[in-house]
Amino acid sequence: MVRGGRWAVLCAAAVLMLAGCGQRATQAKPGFESAEKLPEKLGKDGTTILVGDPDAKMTVHLYEDPRCPYCEKFETTGGSSQLREAMLDRRTRTEYTLASFLDDRVGGSGSKKAVNALRAALEQGKFVEYHEVLYAHQPEESTDGYTDAYLLELAGKVEGLRGPEFNTAVKNMKYRSFVTASQKAYERAGGAKDPEGPGTPTAAINGKQIPTEYNGLLYDSDAFAELLQKIYAKPWEWEETSL
């Protein structure tokens, strides 16, 4: 668990919250106008999707499965809005590792199809927008609702995304190898302690994972905003905590 003064106090409030599936700082330069303007690209490792200013002082690494209802909670009513503001202000950049383990656990292929579609959206420079749309219209976990038809329907809500290249990539699972590699990257992130992966959603800030017992911070927008701001202001205190 987190030890050391203010971090323990900040995190303690999260203990009673859900655990998951399995004063703003001065800006060094102007922020981005909107989420659609955020830079996005595939990382050199071939699996991590990078969003935001690459020179941002802080890095948040998120592990998500598109079918995970707790990821939906984070993305729609939880800390995601605060993370977006931090990216727009150039305080942080976000790295995404997309898992698809829920297909095997619950049945179906919706997670894999959604991850493939998100990779196709990245190719069109529309990952940020499409990612937001998918979680805003996430089907029930048990229904395996991310079909080709539904993914294409949702893509129609993102201006400029639909087209022959994207449509074909979705229907033919063009990025199947990316889906597999991304799932393996998620599993590696769990280490020896969690060989099946750290669970979703999981967040690591500046390389240090928020402990599972404090994952409730992800669903409390104000608490997550405070955590981000404290780490941004005094990153060495976060780095020196014992987890």
Image: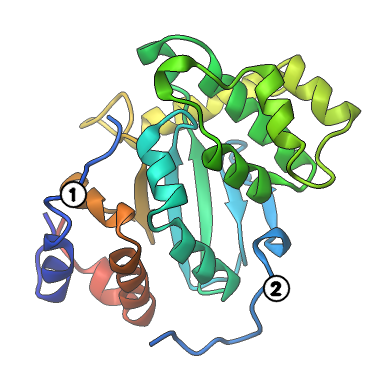
Q: Quadrant of residue 32?
A: bottom right
Q: How is the image coloured?
A: rainbow
Q: Secondary structure at mark 1?
A: loop
Around disc 2, counting alpha carbons within 10 Å, would you say few (fewer than 14), some (14 to 19), or many (20 or more)?
few
Image location of residue 236, percent across then percent down: 29, 75
Using the numbered discs, state the Cα–Cα distance from disc 1 to disc 2 in whole angstroms: 33 Å
* Between 129 and 124, the one nearer to me in the picture: 129
- The residue sitting at 33% across, 64% down in the picture is 224
Asked if one can make out residue 207 in the rendered structure from this viewpoint, the answer is no
**Disc 1 target residue:** 17
- The residue sitting at 75% across, 16% down in the picture is 171
Q: Are marks 1 and 2 in contact (CB under 8 Å)?
A: no
Decide: is 73 above or below 33: above
Task: State which tag comes first along the sequence, 1 or 2.
Answer: 1
- The residue sitting at 24% across, 51% down in the picture is 216
- The residue sitting at 22% across, 42% down in the picture is 19
Amino acid type of the residue tagged 1 in the rendering: Met
Image location of residue 77, percent across then percent down: 41, 53
Amino acid type of the residue tagged 2 in the rendering: Glu
What number is the disc on residue 27? none
Asked if one can make out residue 229 in the rendered structure from this viewpoint, the answer is yes
Image location of residue 56, percent across then percent down: 55, 71
Decide: is 94 above or below 149: below
Q: Quadrant of residue 122?
A: top right
**Disc 2 target residue:** 33
Quadrant of the snapshot with the N terminus: bottom left
Q: In the displayed structure, does residue 170 sit left or right of residue 85?
A: right
Q: In the displayed structure, does residue 148 sit left or right of residue 47?
A: right
Around disc 1, counting alpha carbons within 10 Å, would you say few (fewer than 14), some (14 to 19), or many (20 or more)?
some
Decide: is 30 above or below 212: below
